[in-house]
Amino acid sequence: MDFKILDKLLAGERPYRLKQVNKAIFKDLLTNWDDTTNLPLELRSMLSRQFPLSIDGRIIDSRESDSVKAIIRIDGDMLIETVLMQHKTGRNTVCVSSQIGCALDCLFCQTGKLGYRRDLDPSEIIMQVLFFQRYLKSRGSSISNIVFMGMGEPFLNYDNVLEAVRSINNHEKFEIGARHISISTAGLPEKIKLFADEKIQVNLAVSLNAPNDELRSRIMPLNQKHKIPELMESVKYYIKRTNRKVMFEYVLIDGLNDSDEIAKELVDLLKGILCLVNLIPYNGEPPLKSPPKIRTGAFKNILQENGLNVTQRSRFGSDIKSACGQLVFGEERSEG
Ligand code: SF4
């Protein structure tokens, strides 16, 4: 499914035809052009041949939580992982991937262990959203939120991610409000500034994980190049330009970044910044471990007592390897 090809195929058509085609794909969520009774037969058969609506994907259900992982095949042998999180409030959040693999090798992340394979193009990102929109439609529901927190660093694939975001937001396509879309970055200061200058109200999340350069460089090698002062300067620029709150994600790892002293350092770093801290107890493979609940609670209390806004991410899908930092290319295990 390559939307650039679709644009070329429809180049000579009247605008209302384009609207009909978009409606068939994004609103009616059809999987077969033969079901588009308002399109001429000739156009339908041409689209069936050159822009088939099928997506080669399969679902892996989580028994432990309300998250569902999809594995979507592209290019014959490349696999993308995408996760749907179904919240008790009725919110349906899809966590999309922006790259296959990732070059940044964060300590807690399985995707990083694979290294970088390639960027996903806008169609491959859109396809992940389409897959779950169809899945939810068959259950009488729909996607409410999109987060770019799957495989890859979105800002290392900036143009393709932004193009996909515009389609996700487009009223003729998925029509998901910009405020319901979040991009999470490991912290590329130049791209954060560029993003601040975009005229789009998409949320920004920054994966922080440590309040000082020594510790952050151990957890996130990217920090050796872009140190915390440079990162914070770009975040402040973003807030000044957009007047929007930034979410700092903080993966809590037992004995590494979860002490009272570190919590106090984090308070000093973030005090006065328009932000929300999202604590995510590590839920991946050993040897790293999640802190005991009492430690997570103590860490959270220090932040809150010192005036920071804090949330704690609920556990989603660790049994299907779909929790934060666990999406890996090509895993075909633990089905159903
Ligand atoms: S956490 Fe994100 S940026 Fe870090 S290695 Fe994993 S996918 Fe890449």
Image (spheres, rainbow, N blue to C red):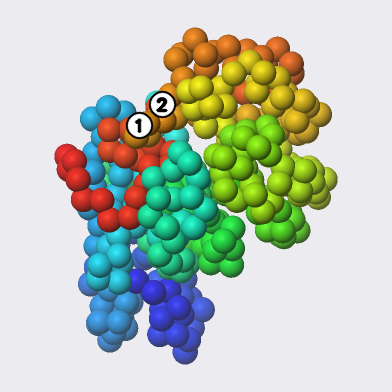
Determine whether 305 is above or below 143 in the image: above
Residue at the (38%, 55%) spot, across then down: 114
Residue found farthest to the bottom: 12
Quarter of the image for the N terminus: give it. Answer: bottom left
Q: Return the residue at label 2.
A: 289
Q: Is residue 171 visible?
A: no
Q: Return the residue at label 1.
A: 286
Q: Identity of the amino acid at label 2?
A: Lys
Answer left or right for 254 relative to 71: right
Q: Position of residue 70 (x, y in %)?
A: 29, 49
Mark-to-mark CA distance, 2 and 1: 6 Å
Q: Position of residue 129 (x, y in %)?
A: 40, 54
The answer to whether the beta carbon of the residue marked 2 is less than 8 Å from any atom of ligand 1 is no
**Which one is nearer the viewer's eye here, 164 or 25?**
164
Residue at the (25%, 82%) spot, across then down: 49
Q: How many marks?
A: 2
Mark 2 crowd level (few <14, some 14–19, many ≥20, 10 Å Cα): some
Q: Quadrant of residue 140?
A: top left
Q: Quadrant of residue 110?
A: top left
Q: Quadrant of residue 29?
A: bottom left
**Which one is nearer the viewer's eye here, 310 or 53?**
310
